[in-house]
Image: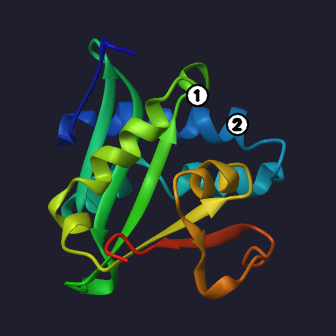
Amino acid sequence: MEKITIRRFAEADAKAAAAVVAETVRVSNSRDYPPEYIDELVRTHSAAVLCRRAEEGHMYVACDGDRIVGTGTVAPYWGSETESILLTVFVLPDYQGRGLGRRLIETLERDEYALRADRIEIPVSLTAVQFYRHLGYDYKNGVTEPEGGLMYRLEKFPRG
């Protein structure tokens, strides 16, 4: 993991970052979701969408040399100064289970948007819920059932 670097996203990263999302959801999430939903996730995480997301928050990429192998974004939650949201957190399947996801989350949590937040929310897949719970995120408002059977809403109160 020493050779992995995490840096801020640049517009030139958009196609490679979108490819990371596509590969990750097609491989890692395929056991939990039907193909139509996977296709929708890929469509809604296109290079153009990632560029817009990077404008709304601070997006990061994890790189193995010049290759992008992970992504993550932290942004204000609906414009709030005291709440933030983590989005677009994906790690290529070959890099999962090696600490990179934790490093990405730690990077996002050290970002100014997270540091100013009293609460951080993250929408998570069925596939990743236990990973985030292990990192201290808990069910938002105690709701342990996924919204529409698809996504959990988790939250963390960093100051409390």
Residue 56 in sight here: no
Up the image or down, 66 lies above or below 118; here it is above
Disc 1 marks which amino acid?
Gln
Q: Position of residue 95 (x, y in %)?
A: 53, 22
Cβ atoms under marks 2 and 1 closer than 8 Å: yes
What residue appears at the point 23 percent right and 53 percent down from the top-left corner?
A: 110
What residue appears at the point 77 percent right and 55 percent down from the top-left corner?
A: 36
Residue to which mark 1 is pinned: 96
Which of the two residues, 59 or 108, is positioned nearer the viewer here?
108
Which of the two residues, 104 or 35, is positioned nearer the viewer here?
104
- In the rendered image, the quadrant that contains the C terminus is bottom left
View extreme (front): residue: 160
Q: Where residue 61 is drawn, which disc sits there?
A: none
Which quadrant holds residue 55? bottom left
Mark 1 neighbour class, 10 Å CA radius: few under 14, some 14 to 19, many 20 or more: some
Disc 2 marks which amino acid?
Ser
* Label 2 secondary element: helix
Q: Position of residue 33 (x, y in %)?
A: 80, 53
From the viewer's perspective, is 124 left or right of 58?
right
Question: Marks 2 and 1, Cα distance to the nearest angstrom?
Answer: 9 Å
Residue 109 in sight here: yes
Which quadrant holds residue 111? bottom left
What residue appears at the point 44 percent right and 49 percent down from the top-left corner?
A: 46
Mark 2 neighbour class, 10 Å CA radius: few under 14, some 14 to 19, many 20 or more: some
From the viewer's perspective, is 51 left or right of 15?
left
From the viewer's perspective, is 160 left or right of 136?
left
Up the image or down, 3 lies above or below 79; here it is above
Q: Earlier in the sequence, mark 2 or mark 1?
A: 2
Q: Position of residue 96 (x, y in %)?
A: 58, 28
Which quadrant holds residue 86? bottom left
Q: Where residue 28 is drawn, which disc sits there?
A: 2
